[in-house]
Image: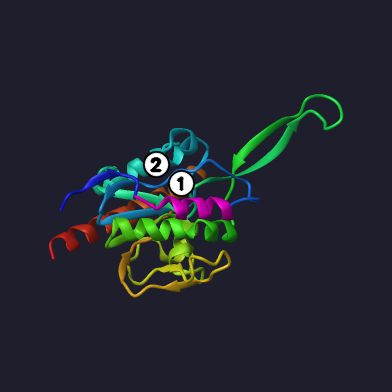
Amino acid sequence: MEVKFGSAPVPERIIQECLHRSEGYDLEGFLLGQGAIPATIMFVGEAPGATEIVEGRPFTGQAGKVLEGYLDKLGLTRQDIYISSAVRSRPFKDKVVSGTSSGTVQRISRSNRTPTKNEVRAHAAILDAEIEYVDPQIIVPLGNIGLHRLIGSHETISSLHGKVIEGPIQRLKDPEDPQSSYIFGERSYSIFPLYHPAAVIYNRSLEQVIDRDLTALKDFLTAKNNL
Ligand code: URA
């Protein structure tokens, strides 16, 4: 089978509808996921940050460097996998850091923030379409946002990281309805949650845990390849 590298061919109609549903939220930029199509393994992160929306490629900022460390340990490259996320624009928040509204010129500092449930839902049809095109067998949610988008929010990454869950994933029940709930599809995937690469930047004590999880994932991938 021919394997291409790039972004899944998500129909323009779906992208435009998701952008329309994002109106009114503090989101900027837009980029699709990227990687091998089809791919056996798909990583699902949270949302792009400041660097990603400029570069137009997922995980090119600080968290991207950590993700590349994950891939090195797994013996994989970006050419082997597909990388996407729950939201495909950058959620931001602005803060006035100097000046006053009446006097001097204000300076605003813009930072990344965690996407809300509504923002995840607004972009859900894009991830659903990417999963359909990429057709992975193994899905690696990176952090709680990706995990909750795929299996619901009854469990957290701190209880599920480093373990395989065999089961279905959620998709939008009615893609035409902006308020649609999610339903579980019929197909079963091997879901292997990992801590989001940004987590280790803020909490160095996670390094060893992540290392163990990557070893477990590597063993799992080897066993699966030998089946
Ligand atoms: N975090 C994500 O989840 N995706 C990116 O592309 C960058 C950071």
Which mark, residue 28?
A: none
Identify the coloring: rainbow
User: Is ligand 1 within 8 Å of the beta carbon of the residue shown at mark 1?
Assistant: no
| In magenta stretch: residue 19 | yes
Is residue 115 visible to the viewer in this orientation of the structure?
Answer: no
Give the alpha-carbon distance from disc 2 to disc 1, as whole Å: 8 Å
Q: Is residue 217 above or below residue 183?
A: above
Callout 2: 10 Å neighbours few (<14), some, many (20+)? Answer: some
User: Image quadrant of residue 58?
Assistant: top left
Q: What amino acid type is highlighted by mark number 1? A: Val
Magenta span: chief secondary structure: helix
Is residue 157 visible to the viewer in this orientation of the structure?
Answer: yes
Question: Badge 1 is on which residue?
Answer: 200
Question: Badge 2 is on which residue?
Answer: 66
Residue 215 image point, x, y percent: 28, 54
Residue sitting at 41 percent across and 65 percent down? Answer: 160
Give the mark nearer the N terminus: 2 vs 1: 2
Name the mark nearer the viewer: 2 or 1. 2
Side of 55 where 187 appears, left or right: left
> Which range of residues does the magenta coloring cover?
9-21
Q: Secondary structure at mark 2?
A: helix
Residue 71 image point, x, y percent: 30, 45
| In magenta stretch: residue 10 | yes
Q: Is residue 58 above or below residue 101?
A: below
Residue at far top of view: 104
How many circles with numbers are drawn on the protein?
2
Contact, CB < 8 Å: mark 2 with mark 1?
yes
Q: Give whichever of 25, 83 is nearer the camera.
A: 25
Q: Secondary structure at mark 1?
A: helix
Q: What amino acid type is highlighted by mark number 2? A: Val
Point out the image quarter for the C terminus. bottom left
